[in-house]
Image: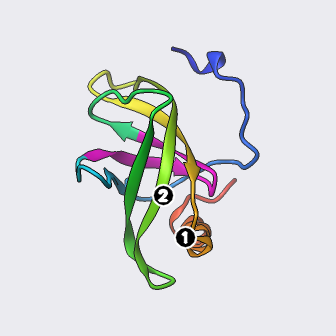
Amino acid sequence: MSQEQFPEKRAQKRRNTLYYLEVFNLETAELLGRLVDITTEGMMLLCEKPLTPNTTYACRMRLPSEILGRTNIICDATCVWQRRAANNDFYEAGFKSLIADPGDIDAIEMLIQHFAFKDL
């Protein structure tokens, strides 16, 4: 599916991260994928396996260093779309995140400030 088929619905601009942080399924400990970009409302992962749209995953994202006393971010994230990546060995998947802990939102904002590419 091409990106043109997904109209832009984001309230926040996603920020590409300097690191491909690992995101795991909290229930199975299986690697879901590596973080490509993030906001406090969603993320895109690069995955080795296709993920199912409209499925909610309990996720654990391992942080590159301790941020605000956290080494992981825990959230529920619903897969909104998935497609083959430019490298056909991988898939891209877009998620809407549901974060219950305000401290995790603060940690994501700090992650973006310190570990994301700046706008030109």
- The picture places residue 105, in percent across and down from the top left corner, at 60, 67
Q: Is residue 101 left or right of residue 82?
A: right
Which quadrant holds residue 107?
A: bottom right
Q: Which mark is residue 75?
A: 2
Lower sequence index among marks 1 and 2:
2
Q: Amino acid at mark 2?
A: Cys
Distance Cα–Cα, label 1 vs label 2: 8 Å
The relative height of residue 52 versus residue 1 in the rendered view (above or below) is below
Q: Residue furthest right?
A: 11
Q: Nearer the viewer, residue 76 or 72?
A: 76
Visual colour scheme = rainbow
The relative height of residue 110 versus residue 19 in the rendered view (above or below) is below
Give the residues drawn in magenta, as a range. 31-45
Q: Is residue 79 left or right of residue 98?
A: left
Which quadrant holds residue 102?
A: bottom right
Is there a contact, CB below 8 Å, between mark 1 and mark 2? Answer: yes
- Residue at left offset 45%, top offset 66%: 73
Q: In the rendered structure, does residue 33 fall within the stretch colored magenta?
A: yes
